[in-house]
Image (cartoon, grey):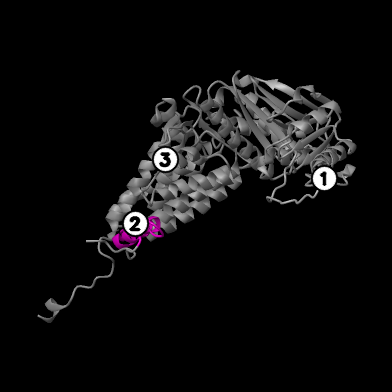
Amino acid sequence: MASMLQPQIILLKEGTDTSQGKAQLVSNINACTAVADVVRTTLGPRGMDKLIHDDKGSVTISNDGATIMKLLDIVHPAAKILVDIAKSQDSEVGDGTTTVVLLAGEFLKEAKPFVEDGVHPQNLIRSYRTACNLAIEKIKDLAVSIEGKSLEEKKSLLAKCAATTLSSKLIGGEKEFFASMVVDAVIAIGNEDRLNMIGIKKVPGGNMRDSFLVNGVAFKKTFSYAGFEQQPKKFLNPKILLLNIELELKSEKENAEIRLSDPSQYQSIVDAEWNIIYDKLDKCVKSGAKVVLSRLAIGDLATQYFADRDIFCAGRVAEEDLNRVAAASGGTIQTSVNNIIDEVLGTCEVFEEKQVGNERFNIFSGCPSGRTATIVLRGGADQFIEEAERSLHDAIMIVRRALKNSTVVPGGGAIDMEISRYLRQHARTIAGKSQLFINSYAKALEVIPRQLCDNAGFDATDVLNKLRQKHALPSGEGAPYGVDINTGGIADSFSNFVWEPSVVKINAINAATEAACLILSVDETVKNPKSESAQGEAAASAMGGRGRGGGFPGRGRGMRRR
């Protein structure tokens, strides 16, 4: 009787949504599988593109896993983890974003039947972590180093890595053209880590082949005043002065009050303003600079003054462009024109203004420190150029990574099949349940070659059987064999130059396993209700803030007149 009268314990606020146990875990796995299905078809050279139309009406056409994941407004808390791993793969390596989402989705899919059969998630997690470590060790064993080669050899090897990345993008048709351009750009910036030293400028019009690489800096002609057309547009070995000041007639700022006893003194004040600007311009000219760039405005007076003295000037140059000119030419950005010494001036071999499409570009080439490069992209539609820029970003990241961690592995699903075979073999040596779990991990890795076949319209089962047979050869000669996208059979990815840096695969498998383990370890979701009182208070304070102060004299705050 006493137990019946015990009050019910209320722990969470009313309206709190809690779901726990096996059903909760299965629903999280289903959500992640659904997200993986969205990007599944974009994998590989024959992958399809996604057209995403957002609430602002802008349209993005993309094949890049990370871009698609960012633009999908995913609200499911567990599925958001997949968005995060795609972003981390993008920022860390640049490529393999679709791979990482697919692998995580597949690991979970393979774990689902075990969870439904009542296996404890921690057992699965332990086996998955073991399998992940084994897989990474195997990748390191299979990786081939490109160290110690001559520059020409290195360039061609890096171009192959870039071409593999670009083959799955929209600009895959011109991958050789762009791959060599990307390699030149990355080698131009040398050991410079900052990616913004490679500028990508987009000019609509023309075709892709009209794109070109500037070994130096290029930026769009800035807003100019009268007198600009009289300035020379080409210099050889000019000195470059970089400023962060306005060269304009400035009226007095702070509402200054000047009391004059004599009207003739007024003229001296006006003259003083003119003298200040002329003094600044004179110092710029005396510095010996032939090109003057400023982040702030250069007015009409200054433009004409420089034109009369055969000096080129451009005001309102974007900050990143100015920084890149400074890095390339060896100059320093000045915040004053007093005592400009030669050390702060930059230089380059050729400066010219060139017409590109219907835009005019200022181009600095042959820079001494040469730690920058600019790719000018041409193409038909705006969306196309945007996607080309994203593709080049991936390729640039890959080439940088391959330069730093100079080991490559065969692509085209070859490495995935080899790890899968290795893990299956290893699983047979384990007694206990984890044999099954590592086997399922190995099976999940086959999703990459299978998806490559599906996306290209080949019979996946047939190709995978051939691959399994090839990889099972005891001599190990079948290790580099992957899917041949052109014929629908299998081919040696290594001799076909389908390469990717090993860091891409290592990162993808690491991130996907981490995400899968994280989702498997969640057994309860608690969703707090938005408290109604908090909403009410927010609304009241918003209303009160407007009405107080002067609307209704004589009434108390918040009181309503009956």
Gap between marks 2 and 1, in whole Å?
Answer: 60 Å
Residue under numbered circle 3: 72
Identify the residue shown where x is 57% and y is 43%: 504
Q: Residue at x 64, y 42 (%)?
A: 401
The amino acid beneath tag 3 is: Leu
The one of 261 and 514 positioned closer to us in this rendering: 261
- SS state under label 1: helix
Q: Nearer the viewer, mark 2 or mark 1?
A: 1
Q: Is residue 149 visible?
A: no
Which disc is residue 265 wearing? 1
Front residue of 197/219: it is 219
In the image, the segment drawn in magenta is: 525-553
Residue hosting label 2 = 539
**Rendered position, 495 above or below 279:** above
| Foreground disc of the pair 1, 3 | 1
Q: Amino acid at mark 1?
A: Gln
Disc 2 residue type (three-letter): Ala
For marks 1 and 3, give the CA distance. 67 Å
Q: Residue furthest bottom?
A: 2
- Label at residue 295: none
Q: Earlier in the sequence, mark 2 or mark 1?
A: 1
Of helix, strand and loop, which one carries label 2? helix
Q: Position of residue 320 (x, y in %)?
A: 68, 40
Magenta stretch containing residue 192, yes or no?
A: no
Residue 140 seen in render: yes
Where does the image place residue 231, in percent across and percent down from the top left? Answer: 80, 25
Q: Is residue 116 left or right of residue 88?
A: left
Mark 2 vs 1: CB contact within 8 A:
no
On the image, which quarter does residue 55 sit in?
top left
